[in-house]
Amino acid sequence: MKLAQILFVFTNVVYAYQGPIPPPPSGPPPPGLPIDGAVVFVFALALLYGVIKHLGFIKSKPKN
């Protein structure tokens, strides 16, 4: 019985020490943000670079 009272007091102290409750998280961002187009552009650019390099138009430097 004594242990339950001590745990109850410590629980209340910890709850009081935490301060005010933070606001709930905001909703997800709207679709179609400007960064979406940039990510697709960079991905397409990297894919195009890989294809061109694979076909041999861009030579990599030989290792010494």
Image (cartoon, rainbow, N blue to C red):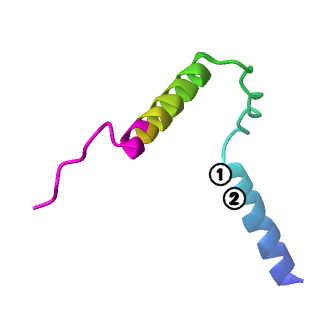
Quick check: 9 left or right of 57?
Answer: right
Q: Tell which of 37 and 54 is nearer to you.
A: 54
Q: Where residue 26 appears, x then y in whole percent?
A: 74, 28
What residue do we see at 37% from left, 41% from top?
Answer: 53
Q: Residue furthest right?
A: 1
Q: Secondary structure at mark 2?
A: helix
Three-letter code, disc 2: Val
Quick check: 34 left or right of 51?
Answer: right
Residue 61 lies, with reference to residue 29, above or below; the image says below
Q: Label 1 crowding class (10 Å Cα cut-off): few <14, some 14-19, many 20+?
A: few
Quick check: 19 left or right of 47?
Answer: right
Checking the image for residue 14, the label placed there is 2
Q: In which image quadrant can residue 13 be found?
A: bottom right
Picture mark count: 2
Spatial CA span between label 2 and label 1: 5 Å
Q: Contact (CB < 8 A) between labels 2 and 1?
A: yes
Q: Tell which of 27 and 25 is nearer to you.
A: 27
What residue do we see at 45% from left, 35% from top?
Answer: 46
Q: Tell which of 22 and 37 is nearer to you.
A: 37
Q: Where residue 56 appears, x then y in whole percent?
A: 34, 43
* Residue pointed to by mark 1: 17
What residue do we see at 73% from left, 67% from top?
Answer: 10
Within the magenta stretch, is there residue 41? no
Three-letter code, disc 1: Tyr
Q: Secondary structure at mark 1?
A: helix
Which residues are the magenta region?
Answer: 52-64
Q: Label 2 crowding class (10 Å Cα cut-off): few <14, some 14-19, many 20+?
A: few
Quick check: 20 left or right of 43?
Answer: right
